[in-house]
Image (cartoon, rainbow, N blue to C red):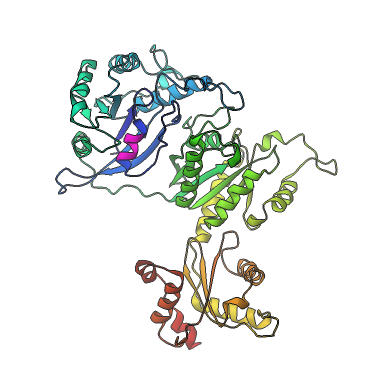
């Protein structure tokens, strides 16, 4: 049985995103009093604990939706470049409709302190009459035939959630929403956690008993990053096979980092669509800062990064900043040159049609910090090379998971240093006593040396370049840790002690240390 689904709907500013974050126990959706912050469907699978802590946890997919009825704040219908944000209304309503029609449980969120509003009554009427979907008089899905529209599950449950019940004095106000016709409201304050335990326990009881089968694991997490209007959401929709993300000519349409699960060649891939960014000095309000923070978090939890570059625009400062974020996180990166279908009639400096090699030369000059990252030509609109981009992503992840034996590393580095070792102006030679790969994802190589100061930045770059030429991770970032031999350190001790010393030097946990290969003794026996 698939994981049951919960959709949170309601008018703007009733606390839908706060409810999602409360259930997820972390900040997934952006919370801000400005109407229209959430536009896409923001989903996450959460585990709900049993009320008495003795039963099995229940997994459920919770989806936050945009607020129905008002999509722009007063006086802010137009963004900072004059685009009409009101044109997003149809797309937002389509996302709400899909969430409603595909969910097992609908949480109709209302504001206990504001009382019943006209929008609340309209939403309640639409829920009672099923006026969601094309031709039903309510929310419509442009370009989709009615027979293709999903039918709500027969067991679908609808419950009112009266949010902002911040204390006992608001409980009576919450009961007023019984007039909307959906049983007794569930009360909660997402801000103060008042009635939090009762709310979660009620949800737990509403869910079916979980299957004995374990939840399918995600084989690859891929974060799609890029500047505004580079085509990130179009790519995610093309791979998902449905309009999962709102695609608009209006820059900055996506605000949250949205997870979209797809199946690819019998493997599960979690695509993380992030907000399109621009220069920090051009940020318009706090929401763009929140979106920037979500993009950084998406990079941190991804296995591979797809850096989307616009083929018809120059590499910008934003592209360079995003590349730097990926570098600092030591994440494998695929540089995806999108909109290749718009480049066909362009000429290079020699008057010849522009080809992939022209873009490779240009990108290597502009994004020097990612000189090792593969470049993929693609078009999210036409579907050109979409599978190729995912294939490369899996290859990079495999490289990042590779481990090299301690003996192989020591023999290689010993020969390398003997041929070209570091030294200072006084002629003091640099010596490497021991080398080990202490971690994967990213591949992390620790060197125990006589004097770390002798190993300059230039020499570290030399080592990294040689590592990429010889070792099995030529296209992924490598983390290099260089430390001095401790005063009483015995390099000829047991393999376990030697690995422990290297792990301690770079701060690995006991669990990570236990997973390290036990090969140092074999090296010293050579």
Q: Residue furthest right?
A: 350
Residue 187 visible from this viewpoint: yes
Q: Nearer the viewer, residue 99 or 509?
A: 509
Q: Is residue 154 left or right of residue 323?
A: left
Q: Nearer the viewer, residue 428 or 398?
A: 428
Q: Residue at x 56, y 22 (%)?
A: 78
* Number of marks: 0
Give residue 292's position: percent from left, percent from top.
Answer: 51, 42
Give residue 108's position: percent from left, percent from top.
Answer: 29, 25
Name the image quarter holding residue 414: bottom right
- Name the quadrant of the N terminus: top left
Give residue 226's position: percent from left, percent from top.
Answer: 58, 42
Give residue 26's position: percent from left, percent from top.
Answer: 35, 44
Q: Predominant secondary structure in magenta?
A: helix
Q: Nearer the viewer, residue 211 or 104?
A: 104
Q: Is residue 166 left or right of residue 503?
A: left
| Magenta highlight range | 18-22
Q: Is residue 160 left or right of residue 100?
A: left
Q: Is residue 506 above or below residue 103?
A: below
Q: Is residue 113 above or below residue 388?
A: above
Reply yes or no: does residue 84 show up in magenta: no
Q: Residue furthest front?
A: 169
């Amino acid at each position: 049985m698939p994981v049951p689904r919960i959709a949170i709907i309601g008018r703007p500013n009733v606390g839908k995103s706060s409810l999602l974050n409360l259930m997820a126990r972390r900040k997934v959706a952006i919370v801000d009093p400005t109407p229209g912050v959430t536009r896409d469907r923001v989903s996450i699978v959460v585990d709900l604990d049993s009320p008495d802590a003795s039963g099995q946890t229940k997994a459920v997919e919770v989806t936050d939706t945009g607020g129905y009825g008002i999509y722009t704040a007063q006086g802010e219908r137009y963004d900072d470049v004059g685009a009409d944000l009101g044109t997003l209304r149809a797309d937002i309503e389509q996302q709400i409709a899909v969430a409603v029609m595909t969910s097992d449980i609908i949480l109709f969120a209302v504001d206990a302190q504001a009382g019943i509003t006209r929008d609340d009554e309209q939403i309640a009427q639409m829920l009672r009459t099923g006026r969601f979907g094309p031709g039903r008089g309510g929310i419509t899905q442009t370009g989709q035939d009615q027979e293709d529209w999903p039918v709500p599950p027969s067991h679908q449950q609808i419950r009112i959630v009266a949010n902002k019940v911040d204390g006992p004095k608001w409980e009576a106000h919450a009961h007023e929403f019984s007039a909307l016709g959906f049983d007794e409201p569930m009360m909660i304050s997402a801000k103060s956690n008042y009635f939090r335990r009762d709310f979660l326990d009620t949800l737990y009881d509403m869910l079916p008993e979980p299957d004995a089968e374990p939840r399918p694991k995600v084989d690859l997490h891929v974060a799609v990053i890029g500047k505004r209007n580079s085509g990130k959401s179009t790519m995610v929709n093309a791979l998902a096979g449905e309009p999962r993300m709102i695609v608009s000519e209006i820059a900055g349409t996506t605000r949250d980092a949205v997870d979209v699960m797809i199946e690819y060649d019998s493997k599960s891939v979690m695509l993380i669509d992030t907000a399109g960014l621009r220069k920090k000095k051009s940020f318009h309000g706090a929401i763009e800062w929140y979106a920037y923070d979500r993009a950084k978090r998406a990079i941190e939890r991804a296995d591979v990064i797809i850096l989307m570059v616009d083929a018809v625009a120059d590499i910008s400062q934003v592209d360079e900043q995003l590349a730097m974020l990926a570098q600092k996180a030591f994440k494998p990166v695929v540089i995806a040159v999108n909109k290749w279908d718009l480049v066909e009639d362009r000429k290079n400096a020699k008057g010849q049609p522009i080809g992939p090699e022209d873009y490779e030369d240009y990108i290597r000059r502009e994004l020097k910090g990612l000189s090792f990252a593969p470049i993929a030509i693609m078009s999210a609109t036409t579907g050109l090379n979409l599978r190729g981009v995912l294939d490369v992503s899996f290859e990079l992840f495999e490289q990042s998971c590779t481990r090299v034996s301690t003996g192989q590393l020591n023999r290689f580095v010993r020969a390398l240093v003997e041929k070209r070792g570091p030294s200072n102006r006084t002629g003091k030679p640099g010596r490497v006593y021991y080398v080990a790969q202490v971690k994967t994802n990213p591949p992390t190589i620790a060197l125990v040396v006589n004097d770390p100061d002798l190993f300059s930045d230039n020499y570290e770059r030399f080592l990294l370049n040689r590592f990429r030429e010889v070792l099995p991770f030529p296209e992924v970032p490598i983390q290099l840790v260089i430390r001095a031999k401790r005063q009483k350190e015995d390099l000829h001790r047991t393999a376990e002690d030697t690995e422990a010393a290297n792990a301690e030097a770079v701060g690995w946990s006991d669990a990570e240390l236990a997973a390290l290969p036990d090969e140092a003794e074999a090296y010293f026996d050579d």
